[in-house]
Image: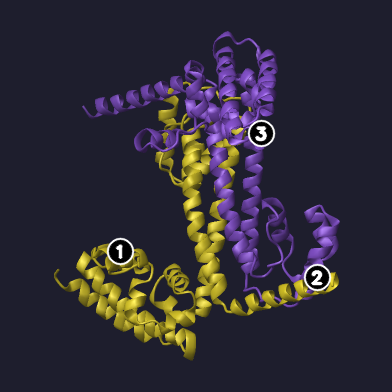
Chain colours: A yellow, B purple
Amino acid sequence: MKEDREEKRRRLIAESGKGVSEAYSSSDHPIIQAINTYKEIEKIQGLVYERMEEWYGIYFPEFKSLGFDAYASLVSEIKEGKDADEEKLGKILNDEAHGKKLSGEIKRAGSRPELAHNEYEVIKEIAGVEKNLSELQSKLDSFIKESVEKSMPNIAYLVEYKIAAELLAKAGSLNRLATMPASTVQLLGAEKALFKHLKFGSKPPKYGVLFKLSQFSNASKKQRGRLARVYATKICIAARADAYTKRFIAEKLKESLDAATEKIMKEKD
Amino acid sequence: MKEDREEKRRRLIAESGKGVSEAYSSSDHPIIQAINTYKEIEKIQGLVYERMEEWYGIYFPEFKSLGFDAYASLVSEIKEGKDADEEKLGKILNDEAHGKKLSGEIKRAGSRPELAHNEYEVIKEIAGVEKNLSELQSKLDSFIKESVEKSMPNIAYLVEYKIAAELLAKAGSLNRLATMPASTVQLLGAEKALFKHLKFGSKPPKYGVLFKLSQFSNASKKQRGRLARVYATKICIAARADAYTKRFIAEKLKESLDAATEKIMKEKD
């Protein structure tokens, strides 16, 4: 009897494993995992940066807003004021003039509080983690690019690969994305605002993930709504080609998309 | 005129730097930074773990709840089902029988979905970050222990060093902690619950940071309140010794604390 139960347990584990395998055997799954991880690590980098800057900033208030990687390199290489010569700073910042300016400020500021025993080693370790996070981000980035261009070549031709990946993640799968009407694709990623609109009557959203389109940067509010609409329409056609026919039709789509974009951008608000 | 302004800017930067230096020249600052970073990294480790398990779990649903380090090691060393022999698993898990069981389950489950190109390398990188976070945590931990035992020897003799560091962080400085009444120390870290009590009349909190005392694990709700009270009283005395007299008086404090604890734990609810 006991043996039977163990047997059954094994069978069930094996079966559920297979079920999961089948559900995820598509090429969608790695892309969705990668883009979700990318977004999470992006937030985490910010959190670690805040900690690092708050701690190290007591000793070097001169360093600020230099970006994750430059800041982490400074932390790793500069323990005391005397380490901060202009050549070193210029090299780390990749900007000779900036290095000279900072080095001057540090010299003029004079003495700093003394580091406690082992304190610098710990701060340096935080900077190390920040660098590891940057490396992970760049690996995730190339992986997303490569995978999106392989399995969604048409969509990837129209929008930046990370936007394509986000649309996929929001839709859940390429097949689901391909069966969605343009109006749904246009609002992918704007679910919260949409529900708020339906429930409380706030203004309806006009775009979600598509907000990250580079074309949006120079567009007015009204133009953005129109741009989102034409992009969503073309993305839908591209998604169907990626999911079903597997033919590359994006060149023509891009041409008409560019023409429509130009027209919209010329229109007055 | 332009030169003057630049001159003034430099002077002001230098002065503000000095002001900051003086404010933080105590030994409190590194401990506060370290414990706050420790708590943040603890959360981040959980976030990264979730991502890693969700992704890798598609390929190896057999691995679950093994803890950060063991899981990260598994990810780093096992790419395919055939890598998961019992010897390797037993070694990673430091448990021969567990390794054998898992290896058997993996063999019986049979084929797994295929990894995409470069996918494993990315998952492995996430595991690497998880390991880096663990290393950072252990460095922070030793740093906190060392610093707390050095600058708050009396408090560190009474409670676990991380609790001592959290009390310090909540108080803001050792001097502030030393001037607080026991009732305030008792509630350090319970600020939210306290304001909720004052504003909405919910039940008043009985402890904050002190909730993490190991003595609490076997105590009833009522006993916990009493324990928090006697601990807070002794911590206050210890804090004054650490901040002002710098004498080590904690042995006696600990004796009477232990006696009080024993008495409370014997009392009926």
Q: Chain of mark 3?
A: B
Give coordinates of residue B242: x percent, y percent: 58, 15
Q: Chain of mark 2?
A: A
Dot 1: what SS?
helix
Where, by quadrant of the figure, is residue A147 drawn?
bottom right
Q: How far across and down, in percent of the image, does residue A30 sit?
A: 57, 71
Neighbours of disc 2 within 10 Å: few (<14), some (14-19), many (20+): few
Q: Residue furthest front?
A: B268
The answer to whether mark 3 and mark 1 are in CB contact below 8 A is no
Q: Nearer the viewer, residue B231 or A52?
A: B231
Residue behind mark 1: A196
Query: How far is disc 3 from disc 2 in space, using C-alphas?
Result: 38 Å
The residue at the point 63 percent across, 41 percent down is B137
Q: Quadrant of the C terminus of chain A?
A: bottom left
Tell me what residue is drawn at x 57 percent, y 41 percent: A126
**Disc 1/disc 2 C-alpha distance (Å):** 50 Å
